[in-house]
Image (cartoon, rainbow, N blue to C red):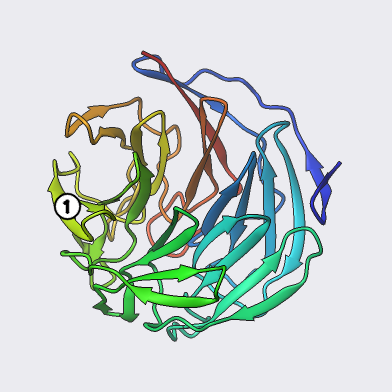
Amino acid sequence: MRIGFFVMALTLVTAGMAIGQEAGQWSAGPDGPAPRAEMAVAQEGSVAYLVGDVFGATEILAFDMADETWSTGPALPASMHHPMAAALDGKLYVFGGYDLRWTVLGETWILDLATGDWSEGAAMPTPRGAGAAVVLDGRIHVISGNAVRSENSPAHEVYDPATDSWSEAAPIPTPRDHLGLVVIAGEIVAMAGRVGGDPTYNLDVVEIYDPETDSWREGAPVPSARSGVAAVALDGLAYVFGGETRQVTFAEAEAYDPAADAWTALPPLPTPRHGFGAATHEGRIYTLMGAPNAGADSSTLVEILTPTE
């Protein structure tokens, strides 16, 4: 099997172990071929791409949720962690992050998923790490993060792949890092995060961006303030998982309905984690790798939530 240029490296069968019953059921997925944490996760079609690693691993990992197989791709142009990434029209876009000395990066790297070739795009106007990126109407919105390790940026910058150019949009009202970001019904939903890179100062803030008016509004807060979360959209809901403080990781799993401006509690993660990502396929949510312990840690874990009514 091939995923673009990715050659199959590992195939395992989902264990199918039921974890929770209330409002959803958890099962164990196939472990990844190598541990990752503090990476970006970008999805195109059934494939989730894992980019970066806090311990310096540079190979991109790809997980095809259609048959639950892993593959290993080419190395990043440089070691990085906490980057922002998005996949669109057969290309993987990687923005910013930190190098292994925690220096903030501002490069834009573009990977052709069919050929495995890297190219460099227009640099970010505001270099930063630990922000988040989403695709909306053919452009990539890169929002907030740390302009230096302990200073949050309100930057909301939009990359247009068609012209390799950046534009500015309304800055996020609550600058933060380690946030969750999803697109629902043509709007961007920003959830949770922390202030100044310090999980002592976790946030429960929800802010929603309307591209029609280039403005933000406040949503109902996350039931439990946290950062280092994984977030994904499915069937009109925003799902938020895990997170950390300085001492512990979170198992919380919650869903937000922007139309009702209301939250629902879900069965907790089987393994509390932070610095991980999530992707969806055929009604299931895959939570990918991340750190079971607070601080610098990593894993190969895949845990799958099947939401139910």
Residue 52 visible, this angle: no
Q: Which one is in front, 35 or 7?
A: 7
Query: Splitting the image into 4 quarters, where does residue 126 fall?
Result: bottom left
Q: In x, y percent, where is residue 276?
A: 47, 52
Q: In x, y percent, where is residue 306?
A: 48, 22
Q: Which residue is painted at 61% across and 77% down in the image? A: 79
Residue 107 visible, this angle: yes
Residue 8 relative to residue 30: left or right: right
Q: In x, y percent, where is residue 201?
A: 18, 63
Q: Which residue is painted at 78% across and 65% down in the image? A: 116
Query: Splitting the image into 4 quarters, where does residue 227 fall?
Result: bottom left
Q: Which residue is mark 1?
A: 205
Residue 107 relative to residue 244: left or right: right
Q: Which one is in front, 90 or 20?
A: 90
166 above or below 273? below
Q: In x, y percent, where is residue 264?
A: 24, 27
Mark 1 belongs to which amino acid? Val
Mark 1 secondary-structure assignment:
loop
> Counting other residues with Cα less than 10 Å from the Cα at mark 1, is it few (<14), some (14-19), or many (20 or more)?
many
229 above or below 19? below
The N terminus lies in quadrant: top right
Residue 168 relative to residue 73: left or right: left
